[in-house]
Image (spheres, rainbow, N blue to C red):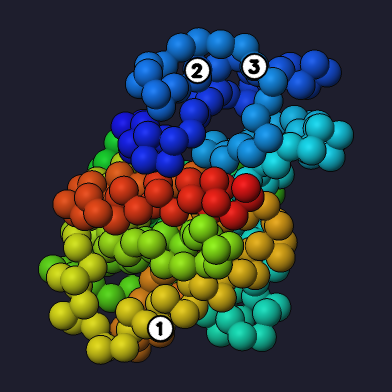
Amino acid sequence: IAYYYELAEKNKVDLFFYSLSRIDIPQAFVKGFLYSYKDKILEEQTVSIPKINLVRTILRNKELYVKLKALEEKENILFINLIPERNKYAINQFLVIKEDIMAFIPQSELLSYDVFSKYMENISKVIIKPINGALGNRITVIEKTGEKYNVQYMSKKKLKIKKIQQNKIEAFFQKRFKNPNTYLLQPWIGFKAYENAKFDVRISVQKNKDGKWQETGIVTRVAKKDGIVTNVAQGGRVVSFSEVKKILAPDLHEQINQLSLKIAKHIEELYPATADLGLDIGIDEENHLWFIEANYSDQRYAYREANHLDMWYETYKTPFEYAFFYHN
């Protein structure tokens, strides 16, 4: 929050911090905390909803989204980066039909036992993810080896492995995925390794004060040596992208940059309020790029962990300037 204080003082503007749940929609008022750039103090107040609002939360209540969109139109208010849901499957299905990026979007299906069985007839290894999950939670990797299934998932930062006999896999599936339509299934893609552990890239793409998409920061997330996900919350670690660049093709950073900007522009077509994204990009053994997922409210701590404090600050500054300069 200190970055927001600094930006408020630099641009001579007061800021109001609040939770969407504290909005009184009929009265168009909200309770929160006002930061005065002149006095440098934070005070609890109830005010009219600000005209420009930069959303830094995941909205899980679709009814609230509808009400906020109606409020936007009625009160001439803007909610930047407000989306109706965080649905990885919906985003994937939207992107996979875009000709300029479809080669970089993995095949995805809504999970069901029939879909799972069909995939396992032709593909020996799959990954199953919750369509609205975060922090690497509830991700499962299943590989068929002969008459057995090798099941892997992370629990409390430790890799859990189960061996399931073929005649028991359906019962296991039904127990583990009680609501399968809340998951998506994808073929497993083997990503490159750094120091014997798989890695992917987190890249921040944000709209700047001119309303243009730009790359603001890039960092590498490395899984535990026995890990199936790179999330720090699951035991992964953060490494400067400059370190990993040494084992990549010379122009791969530029390829990641261009792909990420294209993806951001397409997601904006799906969700027009989009202005701030953390994209996860994987790199396979053939140096081919793969879109993993888009994050709307990524916590950005990876930049701090990699000691990229300049990038960390820029990821706050850029959307702030988009809100302050572009919409004023």
Secondary element under disc 1, as helix, strand or loop, is: helix
- Which residue bears the numbered disc 1? 255
Residue 197's disc is: none
Is tag 2's residue or tag 3's residue first in the polypeptide sequence? 2
Q: Where's the N terminus, which quadrant? A: top left
Mark 1 vs mark 3, CA separation in Å: 46 Å
- Which residue bears the numbered disc 2? 33
Give the quarter of the image for residue 59. Answer: top right
Give the quarter of the image for residue 36. Answer: top left
Q: Where is residue 192 in the image (x, y as percent from the top left)?
A: 28, 76
Between 295 and 149, the residue placed more toward the observer is 295
The amino acid type of the residue labelled 3 equals Val
Q: Does the rendering let one see residue 143?
A: no
Between 31 and 148, the residue placed more toward the observer is 31
The amino acid type of the residue labelled 1 equals Gln
Q: Position of residue 141 (x, y in %)?
A: 43, 58
- 43 displayed left or right of 287: right
Q: Nearer the viewer, mark 1 or mark 2?
A: 2
Is tag 1's residue or tag 2's residue first in the polypeptide sequence? 2
- Which residue bears the numbered disc 3? 47
Whether 113 is drawn above or below 83: the answer is below
Q: Would you say the residues marked 2 and 3 are in contact, meaning their CB atoms lie under 8 Å apart?
A: no
* Residue drawn at the location 49% of the way across and 28% of the way down: 14
Secondary element under disc 2, as helix, strand or loop, is: strand
Around disc 1, counting alpha carbons within 10 Å, would you say few (fewer than 14), some (14 to 19), or many (20 or more)? Answer: few
